[in-house]
Amino acid sequence: MQLYNRSTKKYVSPLKRLMTWTAVYLFPVIIVVILFSKTAHAGLLSFVNSIMGGEQASASVTVPRSALNSQTIPLLKGNVAFNPTSVLADETIPVGDDGQTLMPDMAANNTDSTDAGNLQKSTYIVQQGDNISSIADMFDVTVDTVKQANDLTGNTVRVGQTLTILPVSGILYTVQSKDTLQSIANKTKANIDDILVYNDLSLSSKIKQGQQLIIPHGKPSASDIRTYLSSQKMKVPSFEPILDAVWNWPSYPGFFSCPVPGGRLTQGLHGHNAIDLAAPRGTPIRAAAAGTVIVSKSNIQDGHNGNGGYGNFVMVSHSNGSETLYAHMSKPTVSSGEQVSKGETIGYIGMTGLSTGPHTHFEIRKAQNPFVNPVLCQ
């Protein structure tokens, strides 16, 4: 049945007219009830819930923040089908050949001083395009940490080279004869609890000479450097920082002889316990002590950088556990594996690598360098 509307001269359905009057009169009443009656509000929600079908309807109803309480707040439900051992196809975790070790890129993003899985030294094989800075960034440690742990200078490494990587920025410390855990902490300005954790030690643990310890955030202090240089009567200022706590290394009076007798000290203690001794090009460089040649590099010409700035150089291992390094040679005269005697000529003064004049950069590692006193080379 339809009704005729005289004003519009059209027939109107009775159902449409009923809906119109409902919208005009009933909806305002509902709004007033919702705003002024919490009880009515809850009843209305219950009514809507029953109409829409229980749980499904409740998920679609938004409760105003002001009305949330322990009775009305929605609860999150766990996924009962979740499998904690499952891994999505695009979530592949890179591991080493052993199936357990995280690859370097993962290790770099999972470094935490409290993570027992990251408290040990690791090794890294240098890849094409690597340098010291990029490797340090990869493992989230400082450049000096990588250099000190591997006795490196400059920012150059070679592809295939194996590096020791500490789990945290700091230093790799070699225990000396009278060291205690507390004295090491004091020397390196480090927290003794950190030293214990990173080395799996306790306060009652025994340490022995020659043992290597990871010292988190340890570093030579400026006051220690000044004290040591003062004790050695150093007169030549150093522009390159000292990278090792050399004052902790043992002294071997008379064990070493000057590698360039008559050479002039042009650069005081710097880098890895090194000094610079200048002499005319072609002057013999002599082994400071008897030992075995462990490195002999001779592929660099004068005026060209190479071998990490050392140019042509020789490195000798000695019976007391120390090593000596002689850099910037014009050419070495010995080969790797060769035995040399104290005072034997092992090369000649040159200007290869990072050199501004004919001299040798002479390092003693793991023992004090007595030739910071220029008198001993005269």
Image: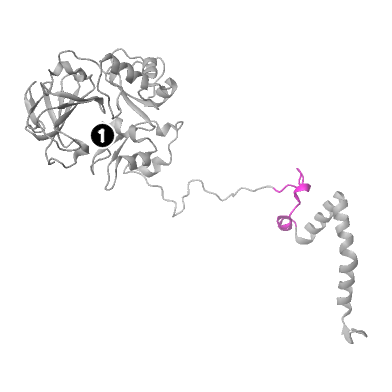
Which percent across, then down, holds residue 152?
26, 33
The answer to whether residue 47 is magenta is no
In the rendered structure, the answer to whether residue 3 lies left or right of residue 355 reads: right
The quadrant in which residue 120 appears is top left
Which percent across, then down, holds residue 147?
30, 33
Q: Quadrant of the N terminus?
A: bottom right
Quick check: 156 above or below 189? below
- Does the image show residue 40? no
How many labels were placed on the picture? Answer: 1
In the rendered structure, the answer to whether residue 35 lies left or right of residue 115 reads: right
Q: Residue at x 18, y 13 (%)?
A: 253
Which percent across, then down, holds residue 230?
29, 16
Q: Write the start and end of the magenta stretch as one range.
A: 54-74
- Does the image show residue 117? yes
Q: Quadrant of the C terminus?
A: top left
Depth order, front residue of 21/266: 266
The quadrant in which residue 179 appears is top left
**Looking at numbered disc 1 in the image, what kind of residue is underneath it?**
Thr
| Colouring chosen for the image of the structure | one colour
Q: Residue furthest bottom?
A: 9
Q: Which residue is mark 1?
A: 153
Q: Residue at x 91, y 66 (%)?
A: 25
Depth order, front residue of 29/374: 374
Quick check: 240 above or below 176? below
Which percent across, then down, holds residue 99?
35, 43
Q: Residue at x 77, y 47 (%)?
A: 66
In the rendered structure, the answer to whether residue 311 lies left or right of residue 105 reads: left
Q: Residues within 10 Å of mark 1 (few under 14, many from 20)?
A: some
Q: Secondary structure at mark 1?
A: loop
